[in-house]
C-alpha cells in the first residue's frame, strides 16, 4: 500500500465511478483498476462491492476511506512543513544585540523587516554585551549577533560592518562641561570617570582604551558600571563623567548630556553583524539576507 494507491482509492469513492476517477487522477481506467486490485490484495480485503449498477464501498472500504483521507491530509501537511523549514519561512532565529543598540533605528528596522517578511519564523532577541555574545556564537546558543568584533575574528565567524558609530563624552546635565567643553580629551584628566569592566566587551574595551592612550589620556576611574546603561545611570547621578558610544543616546536615562568632541569623533566604534558559519539553518540564512540586503555596510576608519 502506498500513498498513490490511497489517492486513487479516495478519488474513486468521491467521484462515484472508476471512469470519473480516472479523469480526476489522470490515469487510464485499466491502470486505475489494476492499482485498486493491488491495494485490495495487499490489504487482503475487498474494498468495493462490484455489481451491475456500479460499485459500492464495503464495510472495510468505508473504514479505509476515513483513514486514507486523514493519511493523505497528514502527508500534505508534513510535506508543506518540511518545505517551509527548508525554505526558511518557518523555524527559529536567535539574535544577540548589545544593550546599547537595542533601540538603534537601523537594528529596529532589520528586526521589524524580518518579522514582516517571515511572520512564521520565531525571532528571539537577547540583550547581550559583546563578550557574552561571542561565547554564545561560538557554542551555538545564538545564531547571529550585533556586537563589537575585531578584524581577526575566529574562523567559525563571518562578520560584516553593520552600523557606524564613534565616541562621545557623557556628563551630568548640570556639569560646567556642557557649556564649556574642552578642545582636547587630555584636558579631562582632572575629572572622575565612570568606566566599564573589560570582561563585558573585550573588543570594545581594548579599542577604546588603546585610542585613549594614543591621545595621551589615562582616565581617573573612580566607579565601575557593568554596562553602558549602568554607566549612564551613574553619570546621571553625578558620580563622574564617561566616554561612551554615540548610540548610547538611545538608551540614556534623564540627566545626561552628550558632548561631541573632534578627537572622539575620529575613533571608529562601529557595530558588526556576525554569524556562525557552521549554522546552515535556512531561517538564519534568510535573516542574514535581510540584514545584508537592507543595510548600508560602510568602510571602517581606523582609530
Image (tube, rainbow, N blue to C red):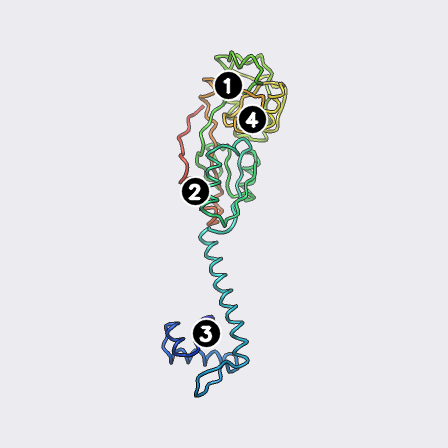
Q: Position of residue 248 (x, y in %)?
A: 53, 27
Circles 1 and 2 in contact, beta carbons < 8 Å: no
Q: Earlier along the polypeptide chain: callout 4 or callout 3?
A: 3
- When the figure is inspected, residue 51 is found, relative to residue 292, above or below; the finding is below
Q: Which mark is residue 252?
A: 4
Q: Earlier along the polypeptide chain: callout 2 or callout 4?
A: 4
Would you name the residue on which mark 3 appears?
Answer: 14
Cα–Cα gap, marks 1 and 2 = 34 Å
- When the figure is inspected, residue 287 is found, relative to residue 53, above or below; the finding is above
For numbered disc 3, what is the local secondary structure? helix
Circles 4 and 1 in contact, beta carbons < 8 Å: no
Q: Residue furthest bottom?
A: 52
Q: Residue at x 40, y 34 (%)?
A: 296
Cα–Cα gap, marks 4 and 1 = 13 Å
Q: Residue furthest front?
A: 53
Which numbered mark, 4 or 3, is in the foreground of this view? 3
Would you name the residue on which mark 1 appears?
Answer: 259
Q: Residue at x 42, y 79 (%)?
A: 17
Would you name the residue on which mark 2 appears?
Answer: 290
Circles 3 and 2 in contact, beta carbons < 8 Å: no
Q: Earlier along the polypeptide chain: callout 3 or callout 2?
A: 3
At label 3, counting other C-alpha atoms closer than 10 Å, the crowd grade (few under 14, some 14-19, many 20 or more) is few
- When the figure is inspected, residue 252 is found, relative to residue 142, above or below; the finding is above
For numbered disc 2, what is the local secondary structure? helix
Cα–Cα gap, marks 1 and 3 = 77 Å
Q: Position of residue 198 (x, y in %)?
A: 58, 28
For numbered disc 4, what is the local secondary structure? loop
Occupied quadrant, residue 192: top right
Q: Judge left or right: residue 289 versus residue 244.
A: left
Amino acid at each position: 500500500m502506498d500513498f498513490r494507491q490511497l489517492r486513487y482509492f479516495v478519488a474513486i469513492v468521491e467521484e462515484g465511478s472508476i471512469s470519473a476517477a480516472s479523469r480526476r487522477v489522470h490515469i487510464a481506467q485499466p491502470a486505475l483498476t489494476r492499482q485498486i486490485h493491488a491495494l485490495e490484495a495487499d490489504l487482503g480485503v475487498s474494498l468495493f462491492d462490484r455489481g451491475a449498477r456500479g460499485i459500492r464501498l464495503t464495510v472495510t472500504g468505508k473504514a479505509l476511506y476515513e483513514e486514507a483521507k486523514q493519511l493523505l491530509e497528514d502527508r500534505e501537511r508534513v510535506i508543506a512543513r518540511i518545505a517551509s523549514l527548508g525554505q526558511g519561512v518557518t523555524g527559529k532565529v536567535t539574535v544577540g544585540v548589545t544593550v546599547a543598540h537595542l533601540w538603534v533605528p537601523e537594528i529596529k528596522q532589520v528586526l521589524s523587516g524580518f518579522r514582516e517578511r517571515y511572520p512564521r519564523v520565531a525571532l528571539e532577541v537577547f540583550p547581550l554585551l559583546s563578550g557574552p555574545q561571542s561565547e554564545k556564537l561560538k557554542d551555538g546558543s545564538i545564531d547571529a549577533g550585533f556586537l563589537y568584533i575585531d578584524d581577526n575574528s575566529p574562523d567559525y565567524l563571518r562578520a560584516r560592518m553593520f552600523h557606524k558609530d564613534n565616541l562621545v563624552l557623557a556628563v551630568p546635565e548640570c556639569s560646567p562641561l556642557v557649556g564649556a567643553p574642552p578642545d582636547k580629551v587630555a584636558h579631562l584628566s582632572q575629572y572622575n570617570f565612570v568606566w566599564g569592566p573589560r570582561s563585558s566587551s573585550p573588543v570594545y574595551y581594548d579599542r577604546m582604551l588603546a585610542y585613549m592612550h594614543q591621545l595621551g589620556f589615562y582616565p581617573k576611574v573612580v566607579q565601575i558600571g557593568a554596562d553602558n546603561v549602568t554607566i549612564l545611570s551613574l553619570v546621571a547621578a553625578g558620580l563622574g563623567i564617561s566616554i561612551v558610544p554615540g548610540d548610547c543616546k538611545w538608551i540614556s536615562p534623564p540627566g545626561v548630556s552628550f558632548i561631541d568632541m573632534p578627537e572622539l569623533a575620529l575613533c571608529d566604534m562601529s557595530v558588526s553583524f556576525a554569524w556562525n558559519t557552521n549554522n546552515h539553518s535556512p531561517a538564519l540564512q534568510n535573516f542574514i539576507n535581510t540584514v545584508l540586503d537592507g543595510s548600508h555596510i560602510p568602510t571602517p576608519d581606523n582609530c
